[in-house]
Image (cartoon, grey):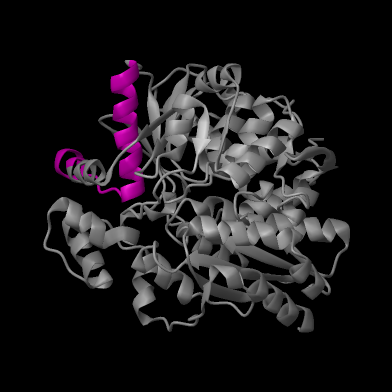
């Protein structure tokens, strides 16, 4: 049975279902597998459905759940909520392959994990015979928020509060969150950036003020700091690889690379876990936008916040503090929690940390970094449409730019799968501007114009936003974070 241990205190251990309940460890660390001893044979998955692939992954990583529990979670999550039976279609492009991760209810890759996380949490609570309320605190740079709100809406024994930067998410992302349904949901804007929101959520776990406000309430998270959010994402790496083998694009066992647009590092870390489970991964290319703190880290071994925070047209990657990188440091250091604690303390106190040369070289065997500025991102959106007839969102564009940059620098032409993380309709105005089409300030008019150009259907969850009432209007300052969270906990304690 896999044991999960805190990246800041390896003596703090738990099972996978306990990690799902707790979210962030009490010491501020991230629950990480102590070791990965299971191996998934890709040959067994070549003709497997997405659901069957998910079962194989979850049984390897969450074996303290029964087969029946996992089956109910998987088949309850991956059903008609997705607009395709494949769940994650894989499309051929000139530069490789594109894994479409945005066919879920909120049109972003976060749906893959956030349709199943509430079910894993509910099953975990049944195992523990608990009846207290789980308060999900979540920070979002755009997509996680709505996916979490959708996944947890009216789930028994849960309440969810989402914090997002008031400026820095797209208008559609903001509208998705502010119109969310459910009696147990709350959405709060923050006068700050995503890193400020994320810092608030992490601080709440150890805040005396928040703890004193919790009566019969347990705090957890739906961010990828929660192992239950991270683990389901492993599935689509195996599934996409199997699709390439099935189509004869690669032979089973041959290596492939993946190019991942990422800011918080969870999406690409799932690819690393897939490699440890036996997937023949050659390179994981970490594609960044103008906030290229990760690209610089993979090149130099120094992680530094001494840089301008830039708001871009790929807002879900407008992040300077990549939480899941902590898990990678922990695993590559041989579970050296003292090393991780020092790195995280240096980051908080000095604004930077550096890793040893040998660790950087080991990291570079699997990871590479690349980044694209706004102009390059826009050009790639237009090129994909004009040359291939494919409309992509700005985050996917960053990934295609990153792949080209990596190949040019390395000469490596290993087959590569690009992760397409959001529907272009979530960013219709920016996509239209990139295509050189007549622009409009109205997001729904932009969706209609993009539909006319592309022929792609507008996702139902986005099309209906126009008719939904705005439910949430609260905006807070950063310094009011703990007071606001404590007040929310008091409200939930009284229910």
Residue, x 12% and y 54% (percent of image)? 436
Viewer-nearest residue: 146 or 364: 364
Q: Residue furthest front?
A: 350
Asked if 285 appears above or below 69 in the picture, the reply is: above
Residue 470 x %, y %: 44, 82
Residue 52 visible in the shown view: no
Residue 272 x %, y %: 57, 30
Residue, x 37% and y 74% (percent of image)? 464
Asked if 285 appears above or below 431 in the picture, the reply is: above
Residue 466 x %, y %: 34, 78
Residue, x 35% and y 60% (percent of image)? 426
Residue 398 is covered by the magenta coloring: yes
Which secondary structure is most common in the magenta stretch? helix
Residue 331 visible in the shown view: yes
Q: Is the C terminus in the top left, top right, bottom left or bottom right quadrant?
A: bottom right
Q: Is residue 119 left or right of residue 425?
A: right
Residue, x 62% and y 50% (percent of image)? 229
Q: Which quadrant of the structure image shows residue 438?
A: bottom left
Q: Which quadrant of the structure image shows residue 351?
A: top right
Residue 287 is covered by the magenta coloring: no
Which residue range is magenta in the image? Answer: 383-410
Q: Which quadrant of the structure image shows residue 217?
A: bottom right
Q: Is residue 266 left or right of residue 377?
A: right
Residue 269 x %, y %: 56, 36
Viewer-nearest residue: 63 or 345: 345
Q: Is the N terminus in the top left, top right, bottom left or bottom right quadrant?
A: top right
Q: Residue furthest right?
A: 129
Asked if 250 appears above or below 448 in the picture, the reply is: above
């Amino acid at each position: 049975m896999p044991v999960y241990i805190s990246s800041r205190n390896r003596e703090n251990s738990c099972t996978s279902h306990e990690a799902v309940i707790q979210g962030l460890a009490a010491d501020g660390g991230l629950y990480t597998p102590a070791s990965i001893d299971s191996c998934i044979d890709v040959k067994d998955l070549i003709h497997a459905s997405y659901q069957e692939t998910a079962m194989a992954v979850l049984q390897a990583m969450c074996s303290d759940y029964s087969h029946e529990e996992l089956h109910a979670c998987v088949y309850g999550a991956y059903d008609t909520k997705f607009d395709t039976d494949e769940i994650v279609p894989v499309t051929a492009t000139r530069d490789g392959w594109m894994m479409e991760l945005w066919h879920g209810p909120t049109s972003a890759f976060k749906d893959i994990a956030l349709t199943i996380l509430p079910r894993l949490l509910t099953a975990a609570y049944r195992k523990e015979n608990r009846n207290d309320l789980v308060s999900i605190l979540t920070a979002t740079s755009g997509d996680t928020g709505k996916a979490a709100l959708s996944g947890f809406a009216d789930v028994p024994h849960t309440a969810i509060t989402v914090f997002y930067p008031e400026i820095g998410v797209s208008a559609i992302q903001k509208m998705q969150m502010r119109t969310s349904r459910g009696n147990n949901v709350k959405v709060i804007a923050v006068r700050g950036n995503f890193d400020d929101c994320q810092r608030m959520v992490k601080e709440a776990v150890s805040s005396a003020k928040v703890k004193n406000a919790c009566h019969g309430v347990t705090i957890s998270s739906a961010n990828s700091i929660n192992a239950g959010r991270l683990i389901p994402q492993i599935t689509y790496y195996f599934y996409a690889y199997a699709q390439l083998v099935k189509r004869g694009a690669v032979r089973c066992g041959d290596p492939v690379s993946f190019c991942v647009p990422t800011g918080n590092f969870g999406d690409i870390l799932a690819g690393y876990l897939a490699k440890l489970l036996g997937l023949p991964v050659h390179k994981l290319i970490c594609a960044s936008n103008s906030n290229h703190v990760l690209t610089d880290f993979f090149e130099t071994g120094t992680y530094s916040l001494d840089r301008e925070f830039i708001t871009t047209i790929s807002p879900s990657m407008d992040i300077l503090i990549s939480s899941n990188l902590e898990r990678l440091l922990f695993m590559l250091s041989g579970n050296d929690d003292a090393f991780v604690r020092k790195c995280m303390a240096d980051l908080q106190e000095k604004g930077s940390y550096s890793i040893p040369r040998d660790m950087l070289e080991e990291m570079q065997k699997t990871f590479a970094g690349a980044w694209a500025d706004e102009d390059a991102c826009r050009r790639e959106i237009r090129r994909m449409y004009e040359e291939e007839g494919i409309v992509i969102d700005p985050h996917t564009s960053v990934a295609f730019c990153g792949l080209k940059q990596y190949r040019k620098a390395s000469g490596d032409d290993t087959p590569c799968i690009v992760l397409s993380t959001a529907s272009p309709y979530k960013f219709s105005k920016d996509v239209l501007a990139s295509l050189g089409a007549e622009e409009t300030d109205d997001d729904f008019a932009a969706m209609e114009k993009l539909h006319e150009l592309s022929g792609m259907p507008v996702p139902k969850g986005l099309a209906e936003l126009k008719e939904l009432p705005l439910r949430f209007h609260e905006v807070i300052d950063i310094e009011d974070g703990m007071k606001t969270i404590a007040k929310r906990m008091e409200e939930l304690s009284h229910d």
